[in-house]
Image: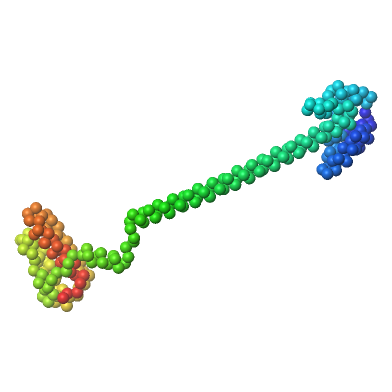
């Protein structure tokens, strides 16, 4: 038993078969293979008891490939070779499984990236489609020239010289607006437009704001009496006041 201590050198000395196993394992790590083989040989000797009965003990215990459906080891050296081959085969199987796991991880990661890219593309495609649909419903954007034309079309018509004398500033009101309820508004507007005419048609901002404010109050007073007037007369009076309030934007004459 002393000559067969569980070391690499002793294992090779006691079991010549280990030398041939080491030769077969040079492509991998010879030292690792011999160490594992030595350990297997030491375990086999401990179980066998004495060297003379090693063959019988190994055959009786069924070490080696018997558990895998193969033949039993007839010597300690053969058992060691079987054990070493199991170790090598297990390592190869583990490496294969690790490789498959790595491939599966890479495949899953690639699919995750593809899914994110598809989601991003779909999101921006939906935004673009939504924007194009709203633009189609709203029609083309209004240009600067079109906006000017629309403003002019929506603005009330300018008063004629018979309605507003550019020289004297005299205002010829529609009959409905001569009602005594509006005397105060007419008086203020007559003075403001007379001053405008006497200054050559120019206005200061303060005077402009006074005219606009007075006309706005005049319109509010007219609205309170809407039920008193025929629709046609009320419409003409309201249009007149709108034009009068817009007149300060233009030069007199």
Q: Viewer-proximal residue, 64 or 201?
A: 64
Q: Is residue 58 left or right of residue 191?
A: right
Residue 62 placed where, x, y %?
Answer: 83, 24
Quarter of the N terminus within the rendering: top right
For residue 156, what is the image quadrant? bottom left
Viewer can see residue 174: yes
For residue 16, what is the image quadrant? top right
For residue 59, what is the image quadrant? top right
* Residue located 19% across and 70% down the image: 248
Question: Relative to 235, does residue 171 appear above or below in the rendering?
Answer: below
* Residue located 14% across and 69% down the image: 159
* Residue located 84% across and 38% down the image: 33
Quarter of the C terminus within the rendering: bottom left
Residue 35 placed where, x, y %?
Answer: 85, 37
Q: Is residue 101 left or right of residue 21?
A: left
Labels in figure, total = 0
Residue 194 placed where, x, y %?
Answer: 12, 73
Q: Viewer-proximal residue, 128 or 211?
A: 128
Residue 69 placed where, x, y %?
Answer: 79, 26
Q: Is residue 99 left or right of residue 153?
A: right
């Amino acid at each position: 038993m002393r000559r067969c201590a569980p070391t690499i050198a002793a294992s090779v000395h006691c079991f010549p078969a280990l030398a041939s196993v080491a030769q077969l394992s040079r492509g991998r790590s010879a030292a690792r293979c011999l160490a594992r083989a030595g350990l297997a040989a030491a375990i086999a000797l401990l179980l066998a008891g004495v060297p003379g009965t090693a063959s019988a003990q190994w055959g009786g215990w069924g070490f080696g490939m018997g558990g895998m459906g193969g033949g039993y080891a007839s010597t300690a050296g053969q058992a060691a070779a079987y054990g070493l081959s199991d170790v090598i085969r297990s390592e190869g199987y583990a490496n294969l499984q690790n490789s498959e796991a790595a491939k599966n991880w890479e495949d899953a990661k690639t699919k995750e990236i593809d899914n994110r890219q598809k989601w991003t593309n779909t999101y921006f495609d939906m935004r673009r489609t939504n924007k194009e649909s709203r633009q189609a419903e709203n029609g083309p954007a209004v240009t600067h020239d079109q906006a000017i034309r629309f403003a002019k079309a929506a603005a009330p018509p300018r008063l004629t010289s018979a309605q507003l004398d550019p020289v004297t500033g005299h205002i010829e009101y529609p009959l409905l607006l001569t009602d005594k309820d509006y005397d105060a508004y007419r008086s203020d507007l007559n003075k403001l437009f007379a001053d405008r005419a006497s200054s050559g048609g120019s206005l200061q901002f303060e005077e402009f704001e006074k005219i606009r404010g007075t006309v706005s109050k005049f319109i509010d007073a007219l609205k309170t009496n809407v039920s008193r007037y025929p629709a046609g007369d009320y419409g003409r009076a309201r249009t007149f006041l709108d034009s009068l309030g817009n007149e300060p934007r233009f030069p007199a004459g």
